[in-house]
Each structure stands twice: as structure tokens, then as C-alpha cells.
């Protein structure tokens, strides 16, 4: 995958995530792998691919489940992906709660789970060999709407939370997965 192909795919990926959330009212947690098809059967030199891997809800319910995904499930997925693809980047996308605390409080003595929830966000983090990008959008819920399929979903608006995004990505158990994918 050329750098231009990757940049286009990355921007299209972010746009598609935004559209999905806006149309459906939420997003399921998932990992997306940007890759090239290994040994393509066509004459083309590279065939870019985007592989979406949903993270089961039961693994996102608590710290133990999230650790299980990162430490046991993901390495098996990575092994299978590398058989057919050459990974270029990895993105993870999820909804999250933003919790805040007074800047004068001692972080070491604070249980983050007891901090008040300030707002709900969508986090998109993309890691590659040369780049880390984190985009965070505030979710503004504006009631319900019925989809053309007859499903009732939250009507949402996404507003980029530039004050929360960090140029080097964000920390946490899901950061650094691209390095684990390449190993």
C-alpha cells in the first residue's frame, strides 16, 4: 500500500465511522486492520484491504474481558491475519465515557471509576509504523429516529473534541496493538 493509498483509506475510514454513528446512533467496538493482500493472485503489485474485527460485547464489559481480548484473543487473530495480509496500520474504534476530576485532586489516591462522567465520545485511534492519530468526537444525542428498515436508533450529532485528541494517540490497553500485530 502506498502512502497516498494509506492516507486516502485512513481519511475515508474516519468519514465512514462518523457516517455510521450518525446514521445508527452508536458504534460497536472493533479493531480495523489496514493491510495489503499477501501474494495476490492478480498481476497487481499491491491490493489494499481493510479488515474489520468486532470485539464481542461480553469482552468489553469489564477490565478482565478487555484484558482477555488484548492478551489472548487478539494474538490469535493477528496470527491468522498475517497469513493472508501484510498489515500497514491498525485502528480501534469505540464509544467511551469521559470522566473528569478536579486538577488539584491527587490522581494516585483516586479511583477513576468513581469519577463523574462528563460526556460520551467516539474514539478512533489509528497506529502505523510512522504515525499515530487519535480523533475523538463528542456524541450529542438528540432523541430517537426510525431508520428506513424500521429500527429505532438514537439521532446523534458528532462534534470533534479537539481538546481531547492527542497527536500521539491515547494510552490504555488498546494502544500499541499495531506493534503486537507486527510481531
Image (spheres, helix red, strand yellow):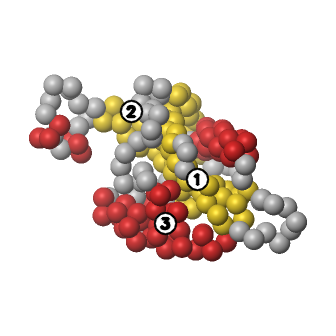
Q: Earlier in the sequence, mark 1 or mark 2?
A: 1
Residue 178 position in % (x across, y down): 50, 56
Q: Secondary structure at mark 2?
A: strand
Does 8 appear above or below 158? below
Residue 104 position in % (x across, y down): 16, 25
- Look at 23% across and 42% down and name the residue there: 112
- Mark 2 or 3: the one toward you: 3
Is 80 or 39 nearer to us in this picture?
39
Instruction: Tell me the CA gap for discs 2 and 3.
Output: 36 Å
Q: Secondary structure at mark 3?
A: loop
Quadrant of residue 97 within the rendered picture: top left
* Residue 183 - label: 3
Read off the residue under disc 2.
119
* Left or right side of 42 for 9: left
Residue 105 position in % (x across, y down): 15, 30
- Mark 1 or 3: the one toward you: 3
Instruction: Give the mark count.
Output: 3
Instruction: Tell me the CA gap for discs 1 and 2.
Output: 29 Å
* Residue 89 - label: 1
* Residue 133 - label: none
Callouts 1 and 2 close, C-beta under 8 Å: no
- Look at 47% across and 34% down and name the residue there: 167
* Left or right side of 8 for 94: left
* Left or right side of 64 for 81: right
Does 22 appear above or below 149? above
Q: Does the image show residue 156?
A: yes
- Look at 73% across and 49% down and name the residue there: 2
Mark 2 neighbour class, 10 Å CA radius: few under 14, some 14 to 19, many 20 or more: few
Does 91 appear above or below 22? below
- Look at 41% across and 65% down and name the residue there: 69
Amino acid at each position: 500500500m502506498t502512502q497516498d493509498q494509506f492516507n486516502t483509506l485512513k481519511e475515508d475510514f474516519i468519514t465512514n465511522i462518523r457516517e455510521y454513528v450518525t446514521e445508527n446512533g452508536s458504534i460497536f467496538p472493533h479493531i480495523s486492520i489496514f493491510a495489503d493482500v499477501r501474494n495476490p493472485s492478480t498481476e497487481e503489485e499491491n491490493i489494499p484491504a481493510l479488515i474489520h474485527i468486532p470485539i464481542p460485547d461480553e469482552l468489553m464489559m469489564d477490565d478482565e474481558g478487555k484484558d482477555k481480548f488484548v492478551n489472548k484473543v487478539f494474538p490469535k487473530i493477528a496470527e491468522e491475519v498475517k497469513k493472508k495480509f501484510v498489515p500497514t496500520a491498525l485502528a480501534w474504534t469505540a464509544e467511551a465515557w469521559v470522566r473528569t476530576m478536579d486538577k488539584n485532586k491527587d490522581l494516585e489516591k483516586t479511583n477513576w471509576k468513581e469519577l463523574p462522567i462528563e460526556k460520551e465520545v467516539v474514539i478512533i485511534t489509528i497506529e502505523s509504523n510512522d504515525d499515530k492519530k487519535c480523533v475523538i468526537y463528542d456524541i450529542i444525542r438528540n432523541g430517537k429516529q426510525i431508520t428506513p428498515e424500521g429500527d429505532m436508533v438514537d439521532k446523534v450529532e458528532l462534534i470533534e473534541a479537539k481538546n481531547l485528541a492527542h497527536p500521539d494517540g491515547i494510552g490504555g490497553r488498546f494502544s500499541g496493538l499495531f506493534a503486537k500485530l507486527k510481531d
